[in-house]
Image (cartoon, grey):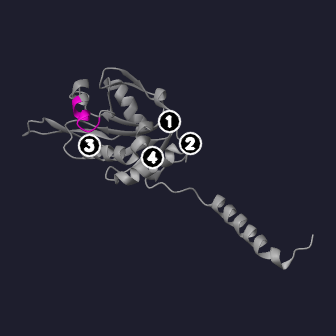
Amino acid sequence: MLITKKQYPGILLLVFAAGFIFMAGCRSPEPFRGTEMPADMPVLDFTLTDQFGEPFMLSEHRGKVSLIFFGYTFCPDVCPTTLATWRRVEEVLGEDAKNVNFIYITVDPQRDTQQKLKNHLSVFSDDFIGLTGSEEALTAVYNEFGIYREVQELADSGAGYLVNHTSRVFGLDRQGKWRLGIDFNAPAEDIAHDVRLLLAGN
């Protein structure tokens, strides 16, 4: 078929459009702002007890993205900062927050009773999940996530002791695989950005 000069502009436009679509499809996925883990790192299932006295099995909450942090209610710095950031993440996510599990696992089961966890977390959000359990059950979870935990006795303090612990937040995708390591001081907007990528299946 012969192409006339009048047809050149239309054909060139189609060529440019096809090239643009091809290049857009070849672009790398938008990067995470947290530390990305290998895509195939499943987390072993565990069962603990939430702040309402109900059993919480991690596998039953797949289908949502999970943010997991290990802390305690007597923590003077990192823990309340993380919870305040999570509250802001909820606000930034809006309706998407319904598809996120915000999971707070105690590293101080001796003092963090279910009622204590309930009262403490409710200050930040009624949707946050606080978990405790037996020393054996918690230790298994600590080991699974590689949690550092050390009791520091305080001789001249009414608090009795502090617990030094890992401050990283763990990001799990909808399939329960560990995908992200998030610094405790990461901006809420960055965390929300990464959560949305996980929700989208990235």
Q: Secondary structure at mark 1?
A: loop
Tell which of 37 and 149 is nearer to you: 37
Question: In the rendered view, does 190 fall on the left or right side of 4?
Answer: left
Residue drawn 32% across the image and 23% down it: 134
**What is the spatial separation of the Cα atoms under label 2 and label 4, in whole angstroms?**
17 Å
Q: Secondary structure at mark 2?
A: loop
Q: Is residue 6 visible?
A: yes
Residue underneath mark 2? 40
**Do the residues bearing badges 3 and 4 touch, measured as CB atoms within 8 Å?**
no
Tell which of 144 and 84 is nearer to you: 84
**What is the spatial separation of the Cα atoms under label 2 and label 3, in whole angstroms?**
29 Å
**What is the spatial separation of the Cα atoms under label 4 and label 1, in whole angstroms?**
13 Å
Q: Position of residue 162 (x, y in %)?
A: 19, 39
Mark positioned earlier in the residue sequence (3 or 1): 3
**What label does residue 79 carry, if any?**
3
| Labels 2, 1: front one | 1
**Do the residues bearing badges 3 and 1 touch, measured as CB atoms within 8 Å?**
no
Residue underneath mark 1? 176
Q: Position of residue 170 (x, y in %)?
A: 41, 43
The amino acid at mark 3 is Cys
Quadrant assignment for the N terminus: bottom right
Question: In the rendered view, does 160 fall on the left or right side of 64?
Answer: left
Location of residue 137 (image quadrant): top left
Q: Secondary structure at mark 4?
A: helix
Mark positioned earlier in the residue sequence (2 or 1): 2
Residue underneath mark 4? 195
Q: Inspect the magenta stretch and tell me whether residue 123 lies in it.
A: yes
